[in-house]
Amino acid sequence: MLETCWLCNKSYNSKRELKNHMISAPHFRLVVICPWCYHEERTFKRVIDLKNHCKRHHSDYLNGVPEEFFSENNAFWLSLYPQDYKRLIRSTKWHDPLAIRARVIVLEWVRKITRYTRSKSEWLQGWEADESGPADQSHDEYI
Ligand SMILES: [Zn+2]
Ligand SMILES: [Zn+2]
């Protein structure tokens, strides 16, 4: 079955090929932020690149952070385009400790960083793309 890109209408033979297309230029739709770079927003094309960056530059923050924090599923919570991310990769569930941890870290990052592309409310809105959240999402329930 053909998989069609919803941004440019190109077709691919598998979801995997479509995913590779979405990762790269011109879309870069699976981009994730580094939640520990506070000077300015740093993004990575895929979560494995973020993981390598964090191991090199943020080992002090990684104490107690399990490997699965950097899974493709959990990186949904660090995604700049959660609506698109969600279409290719299932997110960790809203109440999963790793998901909660990711949201806490991102919200702290949003508070500290001055140069960013998405505001706090855009992050909160983006996370609503995950359907496993509470039906009545008040802002207190994001973490
Ligand atoms: Zn496309
Ligand atoms: Zn960083």
Image (cartoon, rainbow, N blue to C red):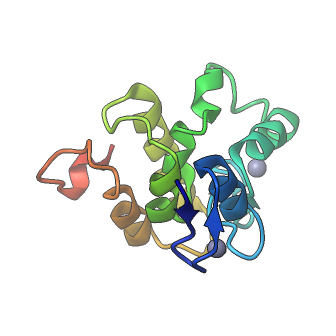
Residue lying at 60% horizontally and 39% vertically, measured from the top left: 72
Which quadrant holds residue 30? bottom right
Q: Nearer the viewer, residue 2 or 48?
A: 2
| Depicted 120 relative to depicted 92: above or below | below
Residue lying at 13% horizontally and 49% vertically, measured from the top left: 135
| Depicted 104 relative to depicted 39: above or below | above
Q: What is the count of numbered marks?
A: 0
Q: Residue 77: horizontal and vertical position, in percent? A: 49, 48
Q: Nearer the viewer, residue 84 or 78?
A: 84
Q: Nearer the viewer, residue 10 or 60?
A: 10
Left/right of residue 130 with respect to residue 58 in the rendered view: left
Residue extending farthest to the bottom is 8
Query: Is residue 33 in sight in this rendering?
Result: no
Residue extending farthest to the front is 1
Q: Residue 29: horizontal and vertical position, in percent? A: 62, 65
Q: Residue 34: horizontal and vertical position, in percent? A: 69, 51
Query: Is residue 141 in sight in this rendering?
Result: yes
| Depicted 43 relative to depicted 117: above or below | above
- What is the quadrant of the C terminus in the image? top left
Residue lying at 44% horizontally and 63% vertically, measured from the top left: 83
Q: Residue 57: horizontal and vertical position, in percent? A: 85, 41
Residue lying at 59% horizontally and 25% vertically, measured from the top left: 68
Residue extending farthest to the right is 56
